[in-house]
Image (cartoon, coloured by chain):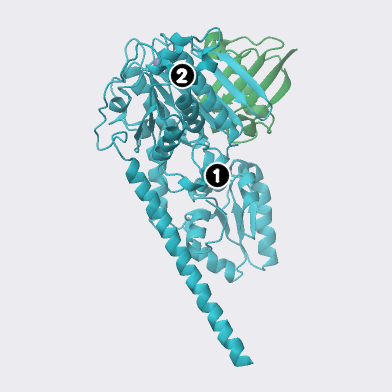
Chain colours: A cyan, B green
């Protein structure tokens, strides 16, 4: 009996191993297929290696019968006739960013009847993108976003020429990439890219449709249109780096960038069709939480604007990370993570502290929403913004903990997602006389080094 | 007594008690936008003044609206507050 049982158990173990091996093989095969698929589409519509020359868009004299039928429902409109549709067929639009904004913008622009669209994105599709980046799907995880979007457009509208650039828009390539396009859409997610695209549009005289979205809010404006203002006219000085929220820290409701991307597509279609843009020298401010849309009149083109004004100081593209103070903050975190600064401990060190049950306090400084999704068992949540207000409470906590442990003092550790916010939180507490250290690399590092099952991305 | 509405968005509300809209009565010495910003910093702001003000005005990256109009058109810091005004502070967004 027991012999038979042992044999069965052994057999079971072997079969399980075999299943794992086969699954792994299958997985490798899908990845290989995906790469192959990418290679297959890398044809003349994928532009790389600094060669951005594309043939001029062949201008049509009139629409084909197929086109007249396909676009009949929008050509039925009183103010959008065959002439407007023909103008779309003879127009091109460049979308920078195939993320949340770009997804819907590209889908609608691809369907609308534009003769040519271009897509710039250097990123690859990740699972956490799919709730908002609806042009991609589960089968595209790991694939270039630009290629994935191109594939979708090919299926949606084979007549639309779709060029892709699988790289980051930079001061070196921006002007050449934009050159063949009539309209540019800024669907990026960061302030450096927005200034870069604005300046490149001013220098190469392109209309720019700019939008952004975070949490449940969105903003949109049309710049450089018929002598209207540019992004710099409204925002001559970039915000301080630490005042900028990001989707992967502050969150974003999927549909909100989708809505803003639709607005971008609408403006692009109107402009290309020869209708009037609605948001030049106007700002659309959307708040999905309270259901409010403001349309706000902004200042006109500014004579003293450093790029579009009378005596511009920006006459060629500059270093935008430097301009937006992004380098400084990156370098700062680099230095602190590279040396064994005594303000920081590693995940391994913290793991030892936890396992040995050494008395201490751990404060997770991420926003409450992120903390609620996943956190370490003994962490308490005080978001960075609320640290200063809670300084007294933290002091009391430390005192209480020390008394409990019968020690003079217990250490305080700060933790966040990537180790940047926690590092930047140390001076806030120091100002209130609280000594603390933070955990290098944050929860991402914790997942990589200590607990691979920790639910964070 | 001048009564105005303050509105916040783009994350600015986090600095002001997490309210997106509120009515306030202004003390007599608050007559223009410059006074209002100083008053808000000293009396309403809950934390991190550097995320709201820089050199006696709002920091770069905050859209200021006076009755839904860019404050640059309305006189910026010199604008004289009137009863019933809606003053809005919205942080520029960078995400997509
Ligand atoms: Zn300008």
SS at mark 1?
helix
* Residue B58 seen in the figure: no
The mark that comes first in sequence, 1 or 2, is 2
Outermost residue, top side: A78
SS at mark 2?
helix
Outermost residue, front side: A65
User: How far apart in space, not on screen, are marks 1 and 2 (Cα)?
Assistant: 45 Å
Whether the residue carrying mark 1 lies under 8 Å from ligand 1 is answered with no
Chain of the residue under the numbered disc 1 shown in the image = A
**Within 10 Å of the Cα at label 2, are there few (<14), some (14-19), or many (20+) other Cα atoms?**
many
At a point 55% along the width and 44% down the height, the residue shown is A428
Depth check, mark 1 against mark 2: the one in front is: 2
Q: Position of residue A421 (x, y in %)?
A: 52, 46
Would you say A131 lies left or right of A160 here? right
Front-most of residues A389 and A291? A291
Q: Quadrant of residue A160?
A: top left
Q: Position of residue A142 (x, y in %)?
A: 43, 48
Compared to residue A416, the image places residue A311 above or below, namely: above
Q: Position of residue A393 (x, y in %)?
A: 68, 49
Q: Which mark is residue A428?
A: 1
Q: Is there CB contact under 8 Å for labels 1 and 2?
A: no
Q: Which mark is residue A268?
A: 2
Q: Position of residue A65 (x, y in %)?
A: 43, 16
Front-most of residues A203 and A207? A207
Q: Quadrant of ligand 1?
A: top left
**Within 10 Å of the Cα at label 1, are there few (<14), some (14-19), or many (20+) other Cα atoms?**
some
Compared to residue A60, the image places residue A393 above or below, namely: below
Compared to residue A356, the image places residue A71 above or below, namely: above
* Residue A262 seen in the figure: yes
Chain of the residue under the numbered disc 2 shown in the image = A
Compared to residue A222, the image places residue A171 above or below, namely: below
């Amino acid at each position: 009996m027991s012999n038979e049982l042992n044999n069965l158990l052994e057999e079971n173990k072997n079969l399980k191993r075999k299943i794992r091996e086969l699954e792994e093989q299958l997985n490798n095969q899908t990845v290989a297929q995906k790469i192959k698929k990418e290679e297959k589409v890398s044809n003349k519509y994928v532009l790389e290696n600094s060669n951005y020359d594309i043939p001029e868009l062949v201008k049509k004299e009139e629409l084909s019968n197929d086109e007249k039928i396909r676009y009949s429902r929008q050509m039925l409109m009183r103010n959008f006739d065959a002439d407007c549709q023909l103008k779309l067929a003879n127009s091109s639009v460049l979308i920078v960013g195939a993320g949340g904004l770009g997804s819907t913008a590209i889908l609608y622009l691809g369907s609308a009847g534009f003769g040519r669209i271009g897509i710039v994105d250097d990123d690859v599709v990740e699972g956490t993108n799919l709730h908002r980046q609806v042009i991609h799907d589960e089968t595209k995880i790991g694939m270039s976003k630009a290629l994935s979007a191109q594939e979708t457009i090919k299926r949606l509208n084979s007549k639309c020429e779709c060029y892709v650039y699988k790289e980051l828009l930079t001061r070196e390539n921006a002007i050449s990439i934009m050159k063949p396009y009539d309209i540019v859409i800024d669907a990026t997610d960061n302030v450096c890219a927005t200034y870069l695209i604005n300046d490149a549009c001013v220098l190469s005289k392109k209309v720019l449709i700019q939008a952004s979205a975070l949490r449940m809010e969105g903003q949109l404006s049309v710049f450089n249109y018929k002598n209207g203002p540019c992004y710099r006219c409204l925002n001559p000085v970039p915000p301080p780096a630490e005042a900028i929220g990001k989707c992967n820290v502050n969150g974003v409701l999927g549909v909100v960038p989708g809505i803003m991307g639709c607005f971008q597509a609408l403006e692009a279609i109107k402009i290309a069709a020869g209708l009037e843009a609605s948001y030049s020298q106007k700002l659309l401010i959307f708040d999905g939480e309270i259901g409010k849309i403001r349309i706000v009149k902004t200042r006109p083109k500014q004579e003293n604007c450093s790029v579009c004004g009378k005596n511009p100081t920006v006459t060629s593209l500059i270093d935008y990370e430097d301009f937006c103070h992004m380098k400084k903050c990156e370098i700062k975190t680099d230095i602190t993570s590279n040396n064994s600064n005594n303000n920081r401990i590693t995940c391994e060190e913290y793991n030892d502290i936890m396992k040995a049950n050494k008395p201490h306090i751990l404060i997770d400084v991420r926003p409450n929403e992120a903390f609620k999704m996943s956190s370490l068992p003994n962490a308490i949540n005080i978001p960075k913004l609320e640290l200063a207000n809670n300084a007294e409470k933290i002091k009391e906590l430390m005192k209480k903990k020390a008394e409990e442990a019968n020690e003079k003092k217990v250490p305080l550790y700060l933790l966040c997602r990537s180790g940047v916010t926690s590092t930047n939180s140390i001076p806030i507490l120091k100002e209130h006389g609280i000594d603390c250290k933070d955990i290098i690399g944050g929860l991402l590092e914790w997942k990589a080094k200590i607990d691979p099952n920790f639910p964070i991305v | 007594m001048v009564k105005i509405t303050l509105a916040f968005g783009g994350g600015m509300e986090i600095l002001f008690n997490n309210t997106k809209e509120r009515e306030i009565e202004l003390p007599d010495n608050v007559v223009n936008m410059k006074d209002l910003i100083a008053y808000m910093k000293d009396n309403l702001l809950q934390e991190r003044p550097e995320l709201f003000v820089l050199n006696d005005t709002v920091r770069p990256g905050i859209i200021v609206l006076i009755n839904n109009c860019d404050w640059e058109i309305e006189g910026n810091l010199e604008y004289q507050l009137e009863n019933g005004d809606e003053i809005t502070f919205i942080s520029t967004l960078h995400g997509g």
